Amino acid sequence: MNKWKRGVAFGMAALMLCATAMLSGCGKDEAANGETTKKLTISVYDRGMVPTSEGTYSDNRWTRWIKEQTGIDVEWVPVPRNDATKKLSLLVASGEAPNIITEYDQNFIRTLYSQGILQPIDDLVANSSTSYKAYLEAHPELLPYVTFDDGKMYAFTNVRSQDSVANHSTWIRQDWLDKVGMDMPQTTDELIEVAKAFRDKDPDGNGQNDTYGISFMNWEAITAAMFQANTLWYEEDGQLVYGPLTDRFADALAFAKTLYTEKLIDPEFITDKDYSRQKQFWVTGKAGILFNTWQETLCGDLLKNDPNAKPVPLAPVESQYGRNGYWQETEAERYSVLTNTLEDPEVAMEFLDWMIEDGWFTLQFGLEGEHYQMEDGVPQVIDAEKNDVELKYSVDYHILRQWDLQPEWIPKMAAKDETSQHLAELKAQSLESTLLYPFRRDLPYEPAMEELTKLKSDFAPIEKQVRIDVITGDKTPEQGLEEYRAEWKRLGGDEVDKLVNEWYQANKANLTK
Amino acid sequence: MNTTKPISNRLVLGRENRSIWKRMFKDRYMYMLMLPILVYFFIFKYIPMYGAIIAFKDFKFVDGINGSEWVGLEHFIRLFTSQDFYKIFRNTLFLSLCDILATFPAPIILAILLNEVHNRVFKRTVQSLLYIPYFISWVVLGGIVINMLSPTSGVVNQILGLFGVEPIYFMKSNAWWVVAYVGSSVWQSAGWGTIVYLAAITSIDMEQYEAAIIDGANKWQQIWNITLPSISGTIAIMLILKMGHALDLGFEHVYMMQNDAVLGISEIISTYEYRVGLEGMQYSYTTALGLFKGIVGLILVTGTNWVVKKMGNSGLW
């Protein structure tokens, strides 16, 4: 009996040891066999969109198709989309950086550059490239985005299509405007008047005073854009000034404060961190104006709840500083950089040339006859459900592309049923109206400075808190601005201002748009 | 004498050593069972400590932990001279003090109350219901709390409305936020915390109660003079353990309940670490902060242990 017990105990201990050893031992892949094939590792965003029937982010029909087409053994390294820069930082830190890193965030790419991880690509493009070289020659406007402080080029990128340049936008209920007998608002004051009418005149006709003027997902950026005071650097009399420190910012705060004190927005927005209440107000017809993006699908949900609703895009309104567009992205799209783990840049160049020449189209639209057919020169979806499974997740494999969507294509590309067509029509209108007004962005990018990163991360919570104090509390916008400036100074802002302006003077030539 | 003493000492030492090894060999299977746990602590708790040296370096990815430049106490100086540090340190201390004052006695009281319940079905049901919040993540609980306290749709304000009280936006006011934070802490952890105390209470000799009843002690006197003194050792140990985590306030809890309006009171060390360290990529600086937090935790644990021992209970060591 005793022996048996001992045996069991020993067995258990051994088993647990094995388990521990296995747990700690995994994650080390076997070394590559036979270095005859060309190899590349590339980061890819994991958006959790690959259905199990299709495989994984590193092995699916498109990764296999890429291998087949290029003859290069490409290994895709998935990084979670929401934590991409964190995960990439960790990979870099552990010496396991993918050969090519792709990322939208310019500041992150510049951080990598300042840490000395990137390879310059000027010579490579000049001597070994075919398609990308030609593309870059045709698009010299991209150069400022990829030329870093030492004057060398470090990243591959392409021009954004218009649909991804445009980002924020505003929607308004035309049927509510008609009901309260008002015109489309043109100025910030008119916008407030319309919102007041939506609040008071029972536009949903249920006899109760239960409507708000505005619901929103991104009101800080949208209200700041009206007064040209976003969290960007603006050139004022030849000097760069941070947006929240400009005089205009007080006006943006005053506007937001009016929205709050007049109860034109939900007073509980502070705790509505995921905007679920805001979404609900719009789709259930309790708010007449929606600050969101141009391609918002919430209109579809609104129309489901209220088929008579008429959501239409609202063009940017004018403030005393003129009419500024909604937040738009810079021209350069995704950045692809070569890291120090890449031994043979020629292979990477061959791959990227193929990508921008042939690869991207199939990766975006699928195979002809299977996923799309050409109609009027536009690839039209054959079976939306099939594409949802087989194609939807491929968005992050075309790391370079030559795509330029025209608003009038949107309805053509959409499915043929009536609702889809109506929504596509709205989207097209919205994109067109959003693109009409340029967004003020004085610099294509910010300098990559440790001092600035530190300052911004220290300043961010103060900025948020003062904003809330002003909007919902007793502080006036002017006091808020005073406090901003004082806090900025206290955190060492003067020094950073000086550094940023020195950088600006030194790099002005590269920064002109 | 003087010359022989060391020899005899050595002999004694040797005999003791041998007997330790002997004893260990005798119980070798027991020690083997312990081995995986030792391995676990070594791999996951001790090896990572090596990384703490980046608190004294200017950590850069390319250079790695070893290659990064030594900067001495620069990060600590920056930490202790920044105004934000005092604010978050004060917030952390204040919130943990409130947290401990409310959540520490709650399970003890609850356990004693449960112990006095004699209807088995009722007791079991209540216990199960009390445990449930512990198993729900703060992401969900935080949402529930925020919704319950909403001035327009929250149940709390609707009840207050029945008594003619104007709706209060609890989550926006600093004072109410602390109340909501501590209250939700109690709600989540009190039930689960009773387990340890209930176990301690069941080990009390029933004869003591019988003797007390014969002497005419009422319920209160029984609780005060028998139950509480009997579980005081457990209470002391739990207090020491709790103090070690005083600065380690649940990150998820605060992070989920926090909002821009109450940042002034709700920004604590762990949320600051997250924001500055991970989002702002200032690893060395936040490691310095983490190290500081660890040292304060150590002081609190040893301090509490000392106090507990002085009060006549046996401490952790």
Image (cartoon, coloured by chain):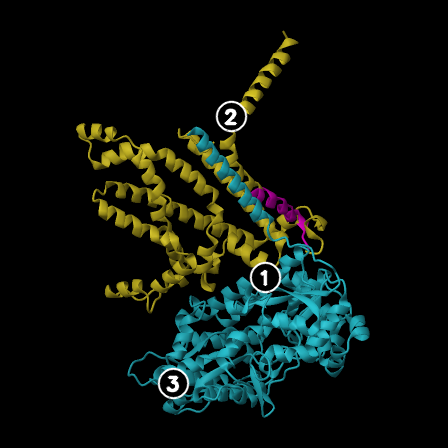
Label 1 amino acid?
Ser
Q: SS class of the residue under badge 3? A: helix
Quadrant into which the C terminus of chain A falls: bottom right
Residue B195, compared with residue A383, is above or below; it is above
Q: Main secondary structure of the magenta part?
A: helix
Front residue of this view, candidates A506 and A490 = A506
Which chain appears cyan? A
Determine the CA span between mark 2 and mark 1.
59 Å
Q: Crowding near pointer 2: few (<14 within 10 Å), some, many (20+)?
A: few
State the extent of the magenta-drawn residues as a range: B43-60
Are the residues tagged 2 and 1 within 8 Å (C-beta)? Answer: no
Q: Is residue B58 magenta?
A: yes
Mark 1, residue position: A457
Q: Is residue A337 magenta?
A: no
Determine the CA span between mark 3 and mark 2.
87 Å
Chain B representation colour: yellow
Say which chain tag 1 marks. A
Horizontal and vertical percent position of residue A497:
67, 66
Label 2 amino acid?
Lys
Examine the image and state in which quarter residue A455 appears.
bottom right
Q: Which mark is residue B26?
A: 2
Horizontal and vertical percent position of residue A183:
44, 91
Between disc 2 and disc 1, the foreground one is 2
**Residue at x 42%, y 68% (from the top left corner):** A272
Q: SS class of the residue under badge 2? A: helix
Q: Which mark is residue A197?
A: 3
Determine the CA span between mark 1 and mark 3.
40 Å
Q: Crowding near pointer 1: few (<14 within 10 Å), some, many (20+)?
A: some
Q: Crowding near pointer 3: few (<14 within 10 Å), some, many (20+)?
A: many
Label 3 amino acid?
Ala
Horizontal and vertical percent position of residue B185:
38, 52
